Image: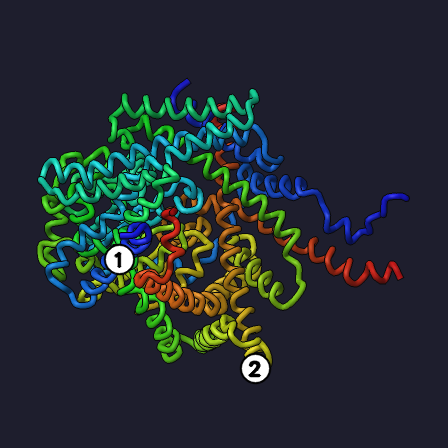
């Protein structure tokens, strides 16, 4: 039996182990997930060691770039999370990561996600490609205003605010609908792909040998 | 006391789940054995994705993220393959310069296989590796911080070439700016002799984490001094469509996107390279009917119980 | 200095210092900080890579605890398979490239024949659960669910050739839903989410969001 055929058979076992979940949680499903978790633990350990060597250890050894010793020290402090008594020490590397993360995001966040979004909504009203597009752009503007009123929780949703919040809810439902629909299509592709593999590659390709 | 008999409306709404599962499994399996081969209509966002790549000025520099995540390969793989086949054509037709990379180990592993099989480049492409195109390899980018560093200077994130292909091995382990194409590209835009986002004309990028478009817009459009404003086209899955659409438009950060294997089929038709996307789109046909049937059954049951069951009791 | 200083105040000072330094560098383009920026940006990534062992310990202890709680033959086979797979991968890594083993075809075999089918299989099962939900949950109860069903099912059918080939407006309807009403819902959600996120980030930088630091324990 060659390695490719063995690979397909092993893959089929794992696909069936996952699909067996439709009959309820069972031994075959649990076995399949635990085996992959075991594999993933070793795989992520190897990657962790490789990139630590690539970014931190090699610069120290090859270029005498000793500032990476500080980073290695803080990285090792993360292991204090394993001790209940000293877990608070891991706040130091976490605060470093968070501070750097916020510092990198904040300067661009307001422009990218707030100012530009409002600007684009208004600018596109004045540059539609067709009448239908103009109606659509007006719909987007109506959505922008009414959804923001929906998130206004300091005043009771009554009267004009109530009607506006209701319309905003409809726009939110439309958005959730597209997210759900995309999720449905994506998951459908996953099942279709697995069935195609089982039928074409395994049943027909190996057992029926065509 | 006897068991209360369910009326027809209640029976309609309480079918065994296993019947639903088996129905959909059969509806998806039938086209595997008996393909339907129906025509596919091209949607605007896919056409925009195609046109953006096709209408690049001659000699443009494309940063291509070879997006591979094996857990969603069935849905996103066809998009990547169709895009690469289009890129191969455009390299010949339009003299595009391609810098590709992967942001996952899955990607690094799968690209090695694809480049031996489905995406095997021509001998000319192989000979020109390092001259007109290069695979940087696996770069652990994904967060705002890592993109910010890479966009300011690629060598800060990846000092040496890390590709895993079976050709161009002489470039593996070499500093980035020793590679002819990267040396040439680094001379453009922004800071000379620094490979940065200002040197890129188009970003082709893929993801299935739906907050990623926000990161990309922050780091490839808004960030930089002056702002990078790198136009991008996106490969993604269906449920990220609402996250990418706010940025889509002619003068906006994103000029086109392809979401899922069904839209990959549309791209394959436009690019003239039919493949897995068309097969996957075909498999969805009968499942669509199943979806409609079960929605109708559920609602028949609901309205039947609401309006007719009461009448029957009366 | 009190315990509160070491456990709460100093981490907050470090967070604020780094955050405001990078913001200042971005806004005022301070030359001295430009060179350090690349190093700063890599620090969280490298810390995450060094900390891989935390996940390893959690994963292994969870498996051992599962065995301790349930000492049956079936659990024994599951736990045994878990450790056997770990041992096998360590051997493969040692024999085929060590730290570089993830590039090798031997390692790749496991990635493509175990990880890929298992993870895709999980999502395949998710589709079947969604089918059950489509049947049980999608009812025209009120205006909101009506919009949900029409938009959602309409978008699904607009991606399926059988429907776009025979229903003239199907593809256009799907495009319309994604481009206009859905955008009308997502765009303001993005804006309000960003406003909230910026406020939380700024509060964290000035030490007002202790909840974000509580994940460090203590």
Q: Are marks 1 and 2 in contact (CB under 8 Å)?
A: no
Mark 2 element type: helix
Outermost residue, top side: A1
Q: Position of residue B196 (x, y in %)?
A: 17, 55
Camera-side residue of A76 and B293:
A76
Comparing marks 1 and 2, which lies closer to the viewer? 1
Q: Crowding at label 1, few (<14), some or many (≥20) Cα neighbours within 10 Å? A: some
Residue B230 visible to an observer of this rendering: yes
Camera-side residue of B285 and C1:
C1
Q: Position of residue C6 (x, y in %)?
A: 29, 50
Residue B117 visible to an observer of this rendering: no
Q: Is residue B182 above or below residue C121?
A: below
Instruction: Name the residue carrying label 1.
Output: C13
Camera-side residue of B206 and C43:
C43
Which residue is depicted at the point 70% across and 57% down?
B299
Q: In the figure, residue C114 lies in which quadrant?
A: top left
Which residue is depicted at the point 24% across and 52% down?
B63
Left or right relative to B292: residue A44: left
Mark 1 element type: helix
Res. A160 mark: 2
Q: Position of residue C149 (x, y in %)?
A: 60, 60
């Amino acid at each position: 039996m060659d390695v490719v055929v063995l690979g397909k058979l092993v893959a089929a076992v794992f696909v069936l182990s996952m699909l067996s979940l439709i009959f309820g949680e069972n031994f075959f499903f649990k076995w399949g997930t635990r085996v992959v978790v075991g594999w993933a633990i070793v795989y992520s350990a190897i990657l962790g060691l490789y990139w630590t060597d690539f970014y931190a250890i090699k610069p120290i050894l090859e270029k005498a770039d000793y500032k990476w010793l500080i980073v290695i020290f803080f990285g090792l402090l993360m292991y204090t999370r394993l001790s209940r008594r000293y877990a608070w020490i891991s706040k130091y590397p976490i605060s470093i990561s968070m501070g750097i993360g916020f510092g990198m995001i904040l300067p661009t966040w307001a422009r990218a996600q707030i100012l530009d979004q409002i600007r684009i909504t208004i600018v596109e009203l004045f540059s539609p490609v067709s009448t239908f597009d103009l109606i659509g752009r007006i719909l987007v503007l109506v959505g922008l205003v009414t959804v923001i009123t929906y998130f206004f929780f300091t005043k009771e949703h009554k009267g004009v605010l109530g009607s506006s919040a209701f319309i905003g809810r409809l726009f939110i439902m439309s958005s959730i609908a597209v997210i759900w629909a995309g999720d449905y299509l994506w998951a459908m592709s996953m099942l279709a792909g697995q069935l195609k593999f089982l039928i074409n590659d395994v049943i027909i390709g190996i057992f029926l040998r065509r | 006391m006897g068991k209360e008999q369910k009326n027809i409306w209640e029976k309609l709404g309480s079918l065994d789940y296993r019947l639903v599962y088996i129905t959909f499994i059969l509806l998806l399996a039938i086209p595997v054995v008996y393909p339907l081969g129906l025509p596919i209509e091209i949607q605007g966002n896919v056409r925009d994705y195609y046109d953006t790549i096709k209408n690049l000025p001659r000699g443009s520099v494309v940063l291509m993220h070879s997006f591979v995540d094996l857990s969603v390969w069935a849905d996103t793989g066809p998009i990547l393959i169709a895009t690469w086949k289009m890129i191969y054509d455009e390299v010949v037709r339009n003299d595009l310069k391609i810098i590709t990379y992967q942001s996952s180990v899955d990607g690094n592993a799968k690209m090695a296989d694809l480049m031996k099989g489905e995406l095997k480049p021509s001998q000319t492409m192989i000979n020109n590796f390092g001259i007109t195109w290069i695979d940087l390899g696996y770069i652990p980018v994904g967060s705002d911080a890592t993109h910010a560093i890479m966009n300011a200077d690629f060598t800060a994130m990846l000092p040496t070439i890390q590709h895993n292909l079976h050709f161009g091995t002489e470039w593996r382990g070499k500093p980035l700016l020793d590679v002819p194409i990267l040396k040439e590209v680094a001379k453009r835009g922004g800071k000379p002799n620094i490979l940065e986002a200002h040197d890129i004309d188009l970003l082709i990028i893929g993801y299935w984490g739906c907050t990623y478009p926000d990161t990309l817009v922050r780091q490839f459009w808004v960030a930089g001094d002056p702002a990078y404003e790198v136009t991008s086209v996106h490969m993604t899955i269906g449920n990220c469509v609402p996250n990418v659409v706010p940025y889509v438009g002619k003068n906006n950060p994103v000029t086109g996107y392809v979401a899922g294997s069904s839209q990959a089929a549309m791209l394959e038709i436009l690019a003239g390279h039919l493949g897995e996307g068309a097969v996957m789109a075909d498999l969805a046909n009968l499942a669509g009917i199943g979806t409609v049937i079960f929605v109708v059954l559920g609602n028949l049951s609901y309205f039947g119980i609401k309006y007719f069951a009461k009448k029957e009791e009366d | 200095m009190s315990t509160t200083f070491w456990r709460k105040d100093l981490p907050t000072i470090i967070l604020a210092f780094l955050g405001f330094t990078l913001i200042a560098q971005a806004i005022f383009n301070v030359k001295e900080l430009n060179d350090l920026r690349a190093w700063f940006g890599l620090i969280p990534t490298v810390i995450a890579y060094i900390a891989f062992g935390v996940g390893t310990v959690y994963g292994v202890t969870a498996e051992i605890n599962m065995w301790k709680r349930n000492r049956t033959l079936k659990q024994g086979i599951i736990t045994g398979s878990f450790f056997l797979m770990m041992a096998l991968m360590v051997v493969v890594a040692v024999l085929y490239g060590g730290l570089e083993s993830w590039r090798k075809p031997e390692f790749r075999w496991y990635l493509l024949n175990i990880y890929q089918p298992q993870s895709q299989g999980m999502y395949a099962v998710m589709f079947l659960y969604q089918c059950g939900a489509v049947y049980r949950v999608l009812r025209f109860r009120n205006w909101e669910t009506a919009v949900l069903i029409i938009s959602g099912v309409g978008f699904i059918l607009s991606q399926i050739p059988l429907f776009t080939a025979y229903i003239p407006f199907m593809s256009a309807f799907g495009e319309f839903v994604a481009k206009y009403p859905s955008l009308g819902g997502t765009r303001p959600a993005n804006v309000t989410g960003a406003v909230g996120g910026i406020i939380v980030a700024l509060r964290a930088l000035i030490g007002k969001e202790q909840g974000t630091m509580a994940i460090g324990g203590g």
